[in-house]
Image (tube, grey):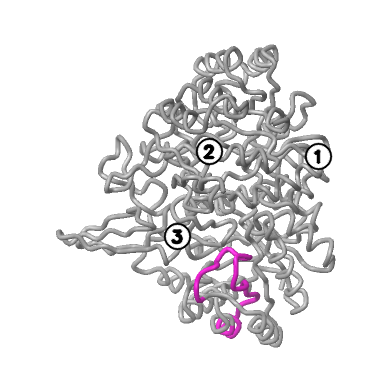
Amino acid sequence: MAVTEMTKLTLGPIAYHWSAGTRRDFYARIADEAPVDEVYLGEVICSKRTPFHESDLPETIDRLERAGKRVIVSTLAEVMLTRERKATADLAAMETPEIEVNNAAGLYARGARPHRIGPFMNAYNEVTIQWMAGQGATHVCLPAELPGPAIAVAARAARDLGLGVEVQVFGRASLAVSARCYHARAHGRTKDNCQFVCEQDADGMPLSTRDDAPILRVNGIQTQSESYLDLLPETPRLVADGVTHLRLMPQVVDMAAVAGVFRAVLDGALSAGEADARLAALCDGTGLSNGFYHGAAGYRRIAMAAPA
Amino acid sequence: MSLAELICPAGTPAALRTAVDVGADAVYCGFQDATNARNFPGLNFTPDELAEAVVYAHARGTKVLLALNTYPPAGKVDLWRQAADLGVRLGVDAFILADMGVADYIARTHPQARLHLSVQAAASSPEAIRYYCEHFGVRRVVLPRILTIPEIRQIKREIPCEIETFIFGNHGLMVEGRCSLTNYLTGQSTNMDGVCSPAGDVEYTRHADGAMSSRLAGFTIDRFGPEEKAGYPTICKGRYTAPHRPEGYYAFEEPVSLNLSRLLPELIDAGVHAFKIEGRQRSKSYVRGVVRAFRAAVDDIRAGRQANMADLVALTEGQKQTQGAFETKKWR
């Protein structure tokens, strides 16, 4: 299983408005206890939140690097306002650490200097990945909705080009972004007048249908899946298909333990059934889904076919 | 035609001829497959139909823009390449695209082709727009419906291409090209399949108390009282509950349609080159009414006359309408 041993576990950027203190504690624990190889930092969703935690960034980077993690800083998914354009240009100007770009404005600012392609960049296919590689991309995170067969083709293309290729295997999927803040709207406010009400919902604000079926989560301008995406059963397949990095998105669960379960599966130290049971217990009733991978409705949980 | 071009929807050959006949400067349309973002049953063009449509439109001085504005999943890119090659062969006037791989393919294979950046590319800053202009030679950007007029004016100063904005029709709330809501509930993707809240998954259920539920793939998107008119279950226009909103509310937006007729002069002044009317899924008679009214209004504005906005406002009579993000930042 030489290939498996090379597969890296990554921790995606925190999507929510966690307080600076919560973030410090979170990353301290990740540094000390989580078997992840790489950690993405930075504000991806809302530029208004950045001032709350950007001053901690150098120390967090240092803390994680001293623990042996590679650190990458992610840029905003939506770039519209002057402050968002400036924040993107400032990050793009950095030489270290690595940068993950989530908006074409970031690609423009970065130019041909090396960078990673984030999940908001819509790298859906091998032709686009080839284009991006030619412009300096060293690594690409595929969209969460890409089905398995397309992941396999994209991963092969990326590896042939010498790129790392990453797939989200855990956490709520980003389903949409908007210019409007739905957190503020839910509280009768506007984005400019939001008073950071999104901080109340550390795992997103639940939306249910009018017959009480939980369906979506609101995170500021972002809409997420109610279920946690869970590709633990598909992990061996992803690795065999050439995916080099598996991304865990931070949720309000024991992320160090979640990483431990994925690490154990990658190491062949845990049976599939035992791993599934442990992850389900860690997620404490939150629905787990893998529909996107199987070309089905994203919220669905599809059982893997038994090996022939 | 340098000022205030009217870009009109053509979901069918009949709608295309209607739009051309009542004065569209350009029509936009797509093939009957996943290569465009309105891949709905009964809509769009076969290659033969598009060939005839181009001849019909060109004979009357109208341009034909081909939408290739979805994102090909890996392994299926050939369908988009073939559509582009066919479009060139049939003589379409421009391609509306979003995917960088598709853009690169057309720019390299058909360097003479005119490229427009689809709203699906979500380019909402001068830097993002310049990326596509400098790398692929994009000549026009269709701006996301999230910018105010002062922001559009500012962008225009900083980009080397024309601007097209939506002025009328369905009002999408999410950033186009970044929305997987439909795929999450139905298994069909807006970005990869060109599908949004598909009719085949829609169901209306009447309850004993006279209320009506509209469902998409089994999920209740809204529930209407006996006196309310039941709307189509588009996910981003549904009513949901949140912990502190137990009564159910429009979490994203009310079912309103965009109508910027009152803002046309300001948009022209801000540097908008072309106005886009949404609605490839709409009927021929709808296209006739809307295009005719906007044609008259744009001609009046061009001639320095006061446009008769009453006709345009009446087009959405009975429906709620909005100026969306364009008028004020408070929309956000």
Q: Which residue is mark 1?
A: A162
- Outermost residue toward the front in this view: A308
Few, some or many residues within 10 Å of mark 1 (<14, 14–19, 20+): few
Of the numbered discs 2 and 1, the one sitting upstream in the chain is 1
Which residue ends up furthest to the left in the rendered image?
Answer: B209
Name the secondary structure under disc 1: loop
Quarter where residue B229 is shown: bottom left
Instruction: From the viewer's side, name the closer residue of B33 and B157.
Output: B33
Residue A195 falls in which quadrant of the image? top left
Distance of label 1 from label 3 (alpha carbons): 38 Å
Q: Is residue A178 visible?
A: no
Q: Residue at x 69, y 57 (%)?
A: B75
Residue found at x 49% / y 60%:
B196
Q: Chain of mark 2?
A: A
The picture places residue B201, in percent across and down from the top left corner, at: 40, 62
Give the amino acid at mark 3: Ser
Quadrant in the picture for residue A190: top left
Find the distance from the CA under tag 2 to the CA under tag 3: 29 Å
| Image x and y of residue A276, in percent | 47, 32
Q: Position of residue A47 (x, y in %)?
A: 58, 32
- Residue bounds of the magenta highlight: B17-42
- Which mark identifies residue A233? 2
Mark 3, chain letter?
B
- Find disc 3 in the rendering and name its residue: B197
Q: Subunit of mark 1?
A: A
